[in-house]
Amino acid sequence: MSSPVKILLVDDENGILDTLKILFRGEGYDVLTANSGKAALSALEVEKPDIVLSDIRMPGAGGLDVMAKVREVDPEIPVILMTAQASLQTAVRAVNEGAYYYLQKPFANDELLAICRRAAEARLLKVENKRLKKEIKRRDTRGAKRPIGRSRPFVEVLKLAETVAPTESTVLISGESGTGKEVVARYIHRLSDRADRAFSSINCGALPESLLESELFGHIKGSFTGAVRDKDGLLVAASGGTFFLDEIGEMSPATQVKLLRAIQEREVTPVGATDSVQIDVRILAATNRDLEEEIRRGAFRSDLYYRLNVIQLRLPPLRNRMEDIELLARHFLKGLAEREGSAEPRELEPEALDVLRRYDWPGNVRELENALERAAVVAPGNQITAAALPDRVRESRPARVVDEEAPPNPTMEVIERAYILWVLEAEAGNKSRAAEVLGIDPSTLYRKLNRYGIGE
């Protein structure tokens, strides 16, 4: 072994503890000792032993309490329990609760060493298997479907996503609406060590503040009107998995404070409760806003921003990755055919592809998908012609993507406001259809209209 096996010895009799210490040090073990269950619990907070050997009967916290704590720290650490007052009932309980072995005092040193040797080998085997699985996952990403794109700016983003995926780092994904931020977030999850657990998400702009807080952190019965029972928040329900906070820039300052505490302390306090609940989730967040500008405006907390922005992925707009248009178009048409149960996807005529490449796509990938789905509905036969594409796409560029009086380097907010206006005009003021084209909830659209001062 590259390093000695670390064993934690726990017994309230100092004579036995000293004897065991000498025995195991003589066999080359790295020995830690605790003369009470309480001391063992404290040691487990800072140390991560390979094996725990503990007496069962001790004042205060006993061996079963120590084993329960071990399960929290690392369920794969083998726990060997020993007692001078053996009973069948205690032995059965110890084994049922996960003890590696149950040993009765007095015991032969050779027997104890043999048991610990087997426990160490089992532990090292599990650690090695876990390491190999992680390595295989890092080397082989074929199990996780890669987002579509081969343009240089997009590929560079994906490479960084693949690098950070196996870590526990918080990731902030920024980019204009429709660039595929959630697609990249799901890709990171599938490449992470949490891939076998749930990917959960919430759109921070789709819910009012009070409801968003309750959904994220949970609530207790009677904490507000309509709270007829206790409810776990989504951050608790997502334990072990990945949680994606979309449109994080829409979150109110009060909820930002609670989210910051949840990330820092790894715990949440349900609405109306006084006790906190531990959480184990990896946080991914996305925004189409310039959060640094939001900080300057006092609308976003700088401390939360720096907590979220451990790793930042900036997704390029579709107009900066035009070589991906054909790949994306064929991908969407194939998906549409599968949903319809068609044997073959519709084909893009060369003229239609040229039209797609000339357009600026202010709504990005989402707008491309919507345009192709609409064209597939109206196109005769199995060919997507240029004539089947929406009028706005057939133009060389949208007429009102940016206001004439906009600054030469518009912010995301300026672009978003202009695009919303343009879509509303294209949909003859129908807000429901505009929200569908924009890919957002109608409630989010109404909130943005109010925020940007766009009248009824």
Image: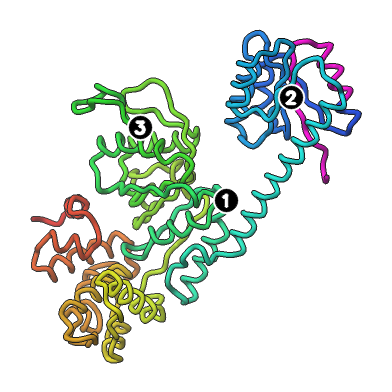
Residue 94 location, quadrant = top right
Image height check: is 121 above or below 322? Answer: above
Dot 3 or dot 2: first in sequence order is: 2
Q: How far apart are marks 1 and 3 (CA)?
A: 26 Å
Residue 131 belongs to magenta span: no
Q: Are dots 2 and 1 in contact, CB under 8 Å?
A: no
Position in image of residue 114 (x %, y %): 82, 32
The circle drawn on residue 53 is 2
Under mark 2, the amino acid is Leu
Q: How far apart are marks 2 and 1 (CA)?
A: 32 Å
Task: Determine whether, in the image, residue 106 is placed left or right of residue 59.
Answer: right
Identify the secondary structure beneath mark 3.
Answer: strand
Quarter of the figure that contains the C terminus: bottom left
Identify the secondary structure beneath mark 1.
Answer: loop
Q: Residue at x 35, y 79 (%)?
A: 330
Give the magenta part as a residue range: 1-23
Dot 2 or dot 1: first in sequence order is: 2
Residue named by callout 3? 232
Identify the secondary structure beneath mark 2.
Answer: strand
Under mark 3, the amino acid is Asp
